[in-house]
Amino acid sequence: GPVVGGWYRVLDWLVPGATKVVAVKKMVLDQGVFAPSFLGCFLAVTGVVNGLSVEENWAKIQQDYVDALLTNYCIWPPVQVANFYFVPLQHRLAIVQCVAIVWNCYLSWKANRM
């Protein structure tokens, strides 16, 4: 929550405004910078918590990362455009967390398949 909330404040600072074009720009930054980084960190931390060796963890990340990122791109861009366009900054995190319940179930399943 705090990381995503901080990221949204940074996005509002980087790309001020509330037009459709601004919402798309924020989504592109979110999906081009934050999503790939966050996903990589999530998979790496999950591997460490599951007790994988460095080599096993790297192999697991290589196995899962691209598929998870492509799935991310099927779900999150429309959610984020709507979120950045229609929802005030102070409520964006709540909207994302509702969608994230399903997304995190998928990531957990993906990360814990052996």
Image (tube, rainbow, N blue to C red):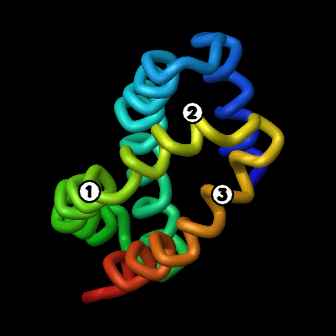
Q: Is residue 107 left or right of residue 13?
A: left
Q: In which quarter of the image is residue 69?
A: bottom left
In this figure, which residue is indicated by the disc labeled 2?
85
Q: Residue at x 29, y 87 (%)?
A: 113
Task: Give the CA separation, mark 1 to mark 3.
Answer: 17 Å
Q: Give the label on residue 93, or none.
A: none
Give residue 58's position: percent from left, percent from top: 27, 60
Three-letter amino acid code at the position of disc 3: Ile
Count residues near mark 3 (Cα–Cα under 10 Å), then give few for <14, some for 14-19, many for 20+. Answer: some
**Labels 3 and 2: the sequence-earlier one:** 2
Three-letter amino acid code at the position of disc 1: Cys
Q: Nearer the viewer, mark 1 or mark 2?
A: 2
Q: Give the label on residue 74, or none.
A: 1
In this figure, which residue is indicated by the disc labeled 3?
95
**Labels 1 and 2: the sequence-earlier one:** 1
Q: Is mark 3 on a helix, strand or loop?
A: helix
**Labels 1 and 3: the sequence-earlier one:** 1
